[in-house]
Amino acid sequence: MSLSIFYTAHIRGDLALLPPLYTFLKSLRADLAQFAPEDEAEVMQCAVQPPSARTLLLDLGDSCAPDVWHCTATEGRSTLIALDAMGYHAANVTGILSAESRAKLAENAMGMALVDFDHPWQDQGMILSTFSPNMRPSADTLAGLSKLHISVTADTTTRMIGHLLYLARVESGQVGTAYIGGTDSDPQLLADAVFDLPANTPPDPTISGTVDFVTNEARFFAKRHGE
């Protein structure tokens, strides 16, 4: 098994954050690609993952906030649309999306998985769900996990318990990373780190365009509903 995970959280509708954040994510992934397998000791020391067969980009929740106008106008969809355009594979949408909003995103061919308690995501031998610090699985449940199971609810630290991976909390403007190695039957957490978005990181023009589109759509919805 070889899996590199990048993740964010607590964006809270800050669309202006996303273009520079995307530039930073691309930079982190490019830095990862510079390392050859023989550099693994150096990579582990600085907690940047060695090259892996697969990367996974996640958001651990709180992508929108009720006091942000475009989140209200789009019923929580605005930031998720932008994250989807950034290539996120899955996002924790607990408390953000109604069933109607989820259906609207599905109608618009949302490629990103929308994960909550009732909607885990299974893909290529792994499961993403919302195991939380207050909802610890039993020992029997842990023993019964035969696939890599990733909790998309932030925890205090990044750690692996059997096949279950918990990811440490990150704040807005931070990117968490984790590298999973070992085998499918015995996955191992080999490295993890949290990186701060550097000041003056240039915005990615494509995501800036996406943000403009999302903002204009939100204005349309707000106007239609007289907000």
Image (cartoon, rainbow, N blue to C red):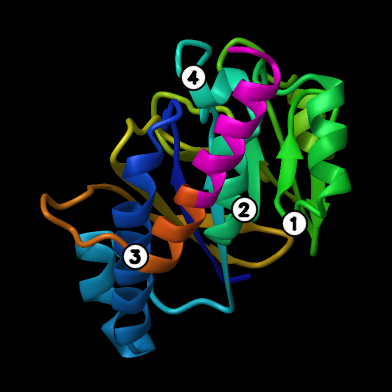
Disc ID at residue 111 = 1
Q: At which x and y percent is residue 79?
A: 54, 38
The residues bearing labels 4 and 1 have C-alpha atoms spaced at a distance of 25 Å
Mark 2, residue position: 84
Q: Which residues are magenta?
A: 213-227
Which mark is first along the chain, 2 or 4?
Answer: 4
Q: Nearer the viewer, mark 1 or mark 3?
A: 3
Q: Nearer the viewer, mark 4 or mark 1?
A: 4
Mark 3, residue position: 204
Mark 4, residue position: 69
Q: Secondary structure at mark 2?
A: helix
CB atoms at circles 2 and 1 under 8 Å apart?
A: yes
Q: At which x and y percent is residue 39?
A: 27, 84
Which part of the image, by quadrant, shows the N terminus?
bottom right
Which mark is first along the chain, 1 or 2?
Answer: 2
Q: Secondary structure at mark 4?
A: helix
Which mark is first along the chain, 3 or 1?
Answer: 1
Q: At which x and y percent is residue 216?
A: 54, 41
Q: At which x and y percent is residue 132?
A: 61, 20
